[in-house]
């Protein structure tokens, strides 16, 4: 393992540790009892919703970090998991957990936007 990849691995492990710490804190915050008949806009419900969204975001981040660590362990870090081409160094410096090259990432995001249902606006 090169010195640069070892440094990235260390960064990813530190980021993983931080995400797990934040998830633990959010889990503790979400263990509160809520009123069975909350009022509209009840602060407890709003806070629980916000924490649930943040938890989902952190779980996705944790999955991305774990995927990058897995690629490092397999010796495939820096290679796009979709097309097999090298991922630009600039991208890896900006986002060490990237497993897709810029072109494949754009394509995946475009496909995800295409699959999302269109919200109807009522006038």
Image (spheres, helix red, strand yellow):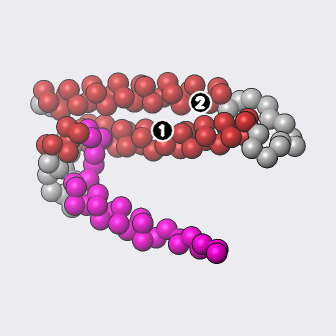
Q: Quadrant of residue 14?
A: top left
Tag 1, which secondary structure? helix
> Viewer-proximal residue, 25 or 80?
25
> Magenta includes 119?
yes
Tag 2, which secondary structure? helix
Residue matched to label 1: 58
Looking at the image, residue 95 lies above or below residue 118: above
Q: Report the quarter where the C terminus lies.
A: bottom right
Which residue occupies the extreme front position in the image? 123
Task: Describe residue 51's horizontal placement relative to residue 74 as left or right.
Answer: right
Label 1 neighbourhood size at 10 Å, few (<14), some (14-19), many (20+)?
some
Percent across and percent down for residue 116 are: 49, 68
Q: Which numbered dot is residue 89?
A: none
Residue range corresponding to the magenta coloring: 95-123
> Viewer-proximal residue, 30 or 118?
118
Image point (46%, 70%), residue name: 115
């Amino acid at each position: 393992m090169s010195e640069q990849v070892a440094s990235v691995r260390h960064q990813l492990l530190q980021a993983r540790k931080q995400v797990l710490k934040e998830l633990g804190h959010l889990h503790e915050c979400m263990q509160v009892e809520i009123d069975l008949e909350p009022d509209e806009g009840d602060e407890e419900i709003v806070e629980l919703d916000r924490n649930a969204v943040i938890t989902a975001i952190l779980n996705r981040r944790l999955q991305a970090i774990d995927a990058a660590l897995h690629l490092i362990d397999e010796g495939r870090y820096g290679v796009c998991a979709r097309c097999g081409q090298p991922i630009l160094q600039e991208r890896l410096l900006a986002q060490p957990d990237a497993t897709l090259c810029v072109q494949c990432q754009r394509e995946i995001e475009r496909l995800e936007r295409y699959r999302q249902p269109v919200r109807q606006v009522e006038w």
